[in-house]
Structures are given as C-alpha cells and as structure tokens.
Amino acid sequence: MLRSWRVKLKLLLATVTLAVLLCWLYLFMGSLEYGRFLLLPPCLGEQPGRDVEREALASRVRRVEEENQQLRRQLGQAEGSDGSSLQWGASAEDGDPPGGERSNRTGCPKQRTVHKCELLHVAIVCAGHNASRDVVTLVKSILFHRKNPLHFHFITDSVAHQILQTLFQSWMVPSVHVSFYDADDLKAARVALQPEVSWIPNKHYSGIYGLMKLTLTKALPSNLSKVIVLDTDITFATDIAELWAVFGKFSDKQVIGLVENQSDWYLGNLWKNHKPWPALGRGFNTGVILLLLDRLRRLGWEQMWRLTAERELMSMLSTSLADQDIFNAVIKQDPALVYQLPCFWNVQLSDHTRSEQCYTEVSDLKVIHWNSPKKLRVKNKHVEFFRNLYLTFLEYDGNLLRRELFGCASLPSPPSNQVTAAVTLSPTPQLLGLLLSLTFLALQLQQALEELDEDDPCYDFRRQHLTQHRIHLFFLQYEFLALPNPTDVTLVAQLSMDRLQMLEAICKHWAGPISLALYMSDAEAQQFLRYAQASEVLSARRNVAYHIVYKEGQFYPINLLRNVALANARTPYVFLTDIDFLPMYGLYDYLRNSIQQLELAQRKAALIVPAFETLHYRLTFPKSKAELLSMLDMGSLYTFRYHVWPKGHAPTDYAKWRTATVPYRVSWQPDFEPYVVVRRDCPKYDQRFVGFGWNKVSHIMELDAQEYELLVLPNAFMIHMPHAPSFDISKFRLSAGYRGCLQTLREEFHQDLSRRYGAAALKYLTAERSL
C-alpha cells in the first residue's frame, strides 16, 4: 500500500513539472514574433528556423512526458493489485491505442488536413421546381468558401434533372463535376423486382424523396468510398473541406457522422400521447450526414435499415420525419455506428430548438439548417442575422464563383475507364458522348475567346456573342399535359426587369401555355420571384414557364433569350412575339383552329399575326376586328411602326387585311419582321445579333430561305403597348460605331446564309445592295 502512494506522489510531481514546462514553452513561443505576445496554441505546429534552445526545450518536454507515461503504467499495475478504481488520463474513447500505450502527443485532438486538390464528394436529393431553386443557394454557399475540387451527386426526378443539368452546363464552374441519378429508378428496385423505399408510409412534407438518402449505398458508384450528404435547405458558412476532414476522426466501427437533434422531438414530450420513433437520447438530425459508404456496404446497410424499418412500422405505422426516423432507429439499435459531430455543423433553425447553444460567436457558425417548414419565418432570437446570411448567397452573383483553383486542374479528366463514373451510375454511350461534347464545347469556347482581336471595333459585339450565360429553366412551378393537343401553341417571348408589368396583362389576354426567358441578375430574379408569388394573376397560372438567363456583358442578348424560350416550349407550335404586345382576346383558340384548318402539319408555313400599336398608356382594348378598324380610322390605333420603320411590317399588306376573310400569302421583302406562328422545330434565332437591330429580320430571312410560306391571318391581331425606349435602342441611335458594327454583322450573316443555302440566298444579298 505504501508503495502505491509513493508511485502516486511521483506521478503528481511529474505532472506538475510537465505542466510548468508546457506553460513556459507556450509563453516562449508566443513571444518569439517581433517581441509580440502571441500566445500561439501548441496545436498549430512548429515553424522551421526556430531557435536551437526551443528544440532542446521541446526534447526535454517529451522526455518528461515519457517518464509520466511510465509512472502511469506503474500506477495502473499497483491499482490493479490492490483493487483501486481511480482513473488517470484519457480513456480509450479519447483515442488511446489498445493496451494503454499512448503516442507522444499533447492533449490537442489529432488534426487531419485535406489536400487542396483532393476531390470532395457531396450528395443531395432534389426533386421538383422549388427544391431545384433552393439548392442553388446551398451550392453558392459551398462554392463561395471552397478551396477544393467538388463532385456533386444529385438524386433527382426528371424535373430537377433538366433544370440542374442545364444550370451546371451553362454555369461552367471550374473543378466542379456533376452526376445525376434517377430517383424514379430508386423508388422501386427493378433488379430485385421489389420496392426500394416506396413501400414506406411517410407523413413528412418531403414525400417519398425524403427517404432517398437511405438508398445512397446502392445509388452512388460502388467505387465511391465516402460522401457528405446535405439537405437542400442548408447554408454553409465555412469551407466544406473542414467537414470532409472530420472523416479522419472516425473510429474503426463508426460509419455515420451526425449532429444531435436540437429539438425535443425524440424525447416524446411535445404533446400528450406523442410517440416518436426510437432514438438514442435526443436523436440525430439527418440534414448533414457523413457516410463511409464502403464500410456501410460491408455491414449490409440495405438489409440493416430495411429490417429495422419493417420492425418499427409494425407499431409506428408510418414515418413522421422520413429517413431521419429510420436512421435513428438503426443507431438506437447499434450506437457504435455513429460519430457525433459538433452541433455547429448543423445549427437547426426550427421553432423551440437548442440551436443557440451551438454558437457564442459568429466564427462558431459552420452550417445553418432551415429545417422548419416556416423556413425564413422561423422563430429564433438571432434569425435576422441568419436570414441576412442566407439572403447574401441567395442574391449573390453566381458568375463571380467561376474562379479557378490555382494549383489544381480546372477540368480534371478521369482515366478513360472511369470517365463514365462521373456521369451517372448506369452510364450509356450517349451520356459519355455528352460529357465529352461538353468538354469539347468548353475548349472551343476558350479557343474562340482567345482568337478575338481586342483592337477590332466590334470586339464587344463578338465577345457578347461568345458569353456563356447561366440559365435556370422553369424557375417557378410549371405544369403541362404530357400529351398536348396536336394543334396546341405556346406564346414565346423574352423580357427584362423593366417589362415585368406586362406579364399580368398578357396572362389575361392569353389562356394557353407561355414560355418566357427573363434576363436578370441574381438579385432581380429574387425580386421577380416575390412579385410572381404575390400576384393573384400569375400565382394562379401553372402553364407559364419562366426561364432565367442571368445577366453578363454589356448588351442585351435578345436572340439567346428567344432561343431559350423557344427550345423549352412543350407544344407542337409556337407564337413568336415580344413582351410589349397584347394579343387579341381569344387569339389562343383562333390560332389552334387556324392550324387545324390550314393543315400546317402537312406544310411548311408561318402564320403572320398583323401588328398594330397605340401611343396611349390607357387603352380600351378592341374586342373584335371591327372595333380595331374603327379605332384605326379614328386615329387611336396605328399599323405598327408606320412612322419610324414602315418596311418592317408593310409587306403584311394592311389594306388587303382590312377586307380579307381568308388567309392570304405574302412575299418576303427586305427588312420584313412580322410576328409569326410556326412549328416548334423552326430555325433558331441568330445569336450574333445582340441589343437592338436585325434580330427578327434575320430570322424571317432564314424562314424564307427554307421556303416557308408566309400566310397572313385575316381575323388575328396584336397591339403594341407604349413604353420608355430601351438602353440598347438609345445606343443604336446615338452611336455611329454601334450602327457600323451592326452593318458588319449583317454582311457576315449574308455570307453565312449563302454558304448554307447556296444560290437560293443570292436574292437577299442583291436586295441588301439595292437599298
């Protein structure tokens, strides 16, 4: 017994000596830098070139620590012999190797660094129009802070797939890979011919997609060993590489990293007879998950969660919090599977949570989770701060995130036998070809930009033509019948923020589907979203497709916008118009009847809708052709642009239209630019024409070159509403250089037309020279 106390006394003296030496070393290191008292923590490591005295001191500290370790082992043996149960030092949970041996280290946790070029994998389940819009803010926050190449794995429905694929292809962020996996294939396993997750009753608002994270070991590529899984309502406030580094802290048995749930849900005391799914303590939140996929596959994860879910559903009947309930039930059964993340990796902003305990300073925040159905309206005393942080990324210019990662390849190319893994789980030759074509497109674009002559007077026009604009299709909810009427027609137009007031009026005049391309900044897109959601007229429509083309460059890319709206129309026919025209009441039905009567399916024709204009902001809109002719005679209406650009619409032959009762054919003439109804597969607009001038003229010329009949409809009309001149038309009027470049572009267009259509295009060049 006396020997035991002597050992304890020696250990105490050694511990005190070590503490004094460590404190002296700590202060000494802090005073080295220019005499300043820095107090650098010992965890930061040593810098090269330090004084020899410091090395000697560090060596002495290590020797004292080794002696201390030896005394601890002796004490442990003495306590084992006399039955004492005192505990000294760290437990096995703190990372001690088996057998009580410890490496020479301080009390600082082991830090795992992430190489700056290491590829980080992030998986996100995303379905529908709203989630596709929300996930962009999450992606922006990650890209803003990131210093590593990223590979996003999206489990999507068909809607989110189209939206996000177009967005990332047009975004062209360096060192970012994107893969898509069809959620419909994961709902029911086709190989096993049995349901995968669709058999699980779920009360959560996320529906069946809230269960998809359970399938990631099967959905993601088999050679992917680990992944960070995120909900779409997450905002990052730090570099995601810090979270990736936490994988290095997992023990051999831990396979899932989660933050404790910060509400009382799983405690079962929220209301009378509240019966949640089983969970360990407060349970865990699955908004942020670290998954070691290779270990989970070896453990038989699919069978593990399925058996647990089947057992619990016998009494619970359904899940309330989707996959989170099942994850917690599995962890309750085997707690060794989970590594508990610090709560700042998932600060949960739902009502009545303990989230305020996760931070004391702004620098403590890592990840913010808007996991309440109320989202930004959640109750939290710091919600204004969190809301402002979220809005910062919501309205942040995504073009600024196209920055290179210096020292890392901007477009890393996987080995030829692994290229398809970066495309999809079940690669096809078509998808492989898509990846290669996108890479080739990026290289072509870069080469074209390098070949531009900055001394060319028209450099800005040519540069704008090559600008790669981000495109977010179907920005709002859009619903359309899968099997449309064979004569159905979509109104196609483009606009910017200054024409937003026209939307409600057009929706009142046109009951059919509409496809609109909106040229906006990120901040303006959010203003538009609020405007549309607050409008009774717009919010009631589900057949209006809004496609955001994000601003970049100094010219308005009018024909790019038209092509985006045209390409995403879902009907066989399109009405190509401009946003500042109001179609006559009933035009939608009239056009469908005309398409059927004229048998447009069997002929190549463009139906012309005659255009008129008013100079009055307040107009009693004519309800018939007779009323319009009366207003035309009284001088309250005019044929469109008769006083400034008569050539644009004179070939319509308004005199003949006044008395016409059947469609009549007209011939192409120079500068003719009517508004037409054509098949959706008509030629695209020429995107070299930006800003004002020749953007429609060139399109009608190409229709004529392809031998479209030009047929004027006798009982159709549209009226142009007055508005302030656009910025681009002002530049056209004031700048001789602008007009000169437009003329250059016209000549180049004629040359391209001649190359494509040969002798048939000579008449356009002849007509141009005769003007």
Image: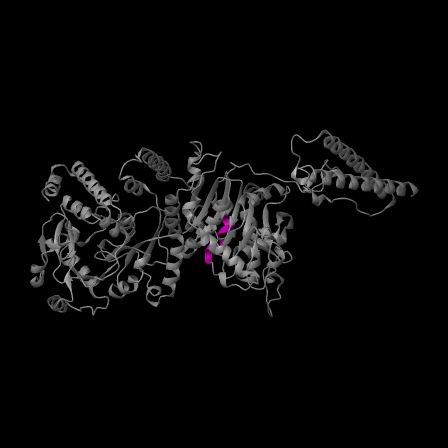
| Mark count | 0
Check if residue 242 falls in the magenta segment: no
Span colored in magenta: 207-215
In this rendered view, identify the residue nearer to me: 597 or 408: 408
Instruction: Answer whether residue 320 is visible to the viewer in this image.
Output: no
Q: Residue at the far right: name it.
A: 2
Q: Nearer the viewer, residue 423 or 532?
A: 532
- Give the side of residue 532 with respect to residue 394, left or right: left
Q: Would residue 486 be seen by someone viewing this image from the given angle?
A: yes
Q: How is the structure coloured here?
A: one colour
Q: Quadrant of residue 510?
A: bottom left
Instruction: Please indicate whether residue 22 sits to the left or right of residue 656 in the image.
Output: right
Q: Quadrant of residue 719?
A: bottom left
The residue depicted at 38 percent of the width and 46 percent of the height is 165
Position above or below: 750 against 682: above
624 vs 42, left or right, is left
Q: Position of residue 532 (x, y in %)?
A: 36, 62
Q: Is residue 14 above or below residue 534?
A: above
Tell me what residue is drawn at x 78 percent, y 42 percent.
19
Q: Is residue 41 left or right of residue 404?
A: right
Q: Quadrant of the C terminus?
A: top left
| Helix, strand or loop for the magenta stretch, by majority | helix
Q: Position of residue 14 (x, y in %)?
A: 82, 39
Would you say residue 209 sits in the magenta stretch? yes
Up-down: is 47 above or below 675? Answer: above
Front in this rendered view, residue 401 or 335: 401
Of the 4 image quadrants, the one containing the N terminus is top right
Relative depth, front residue between 77 and 401: 401
Q: Position of residue 293 (x, y in %)?
A: 54, 43
Q: Pinpoint residue 287: horizontal percent, then vertical percent.
A: 53, 53
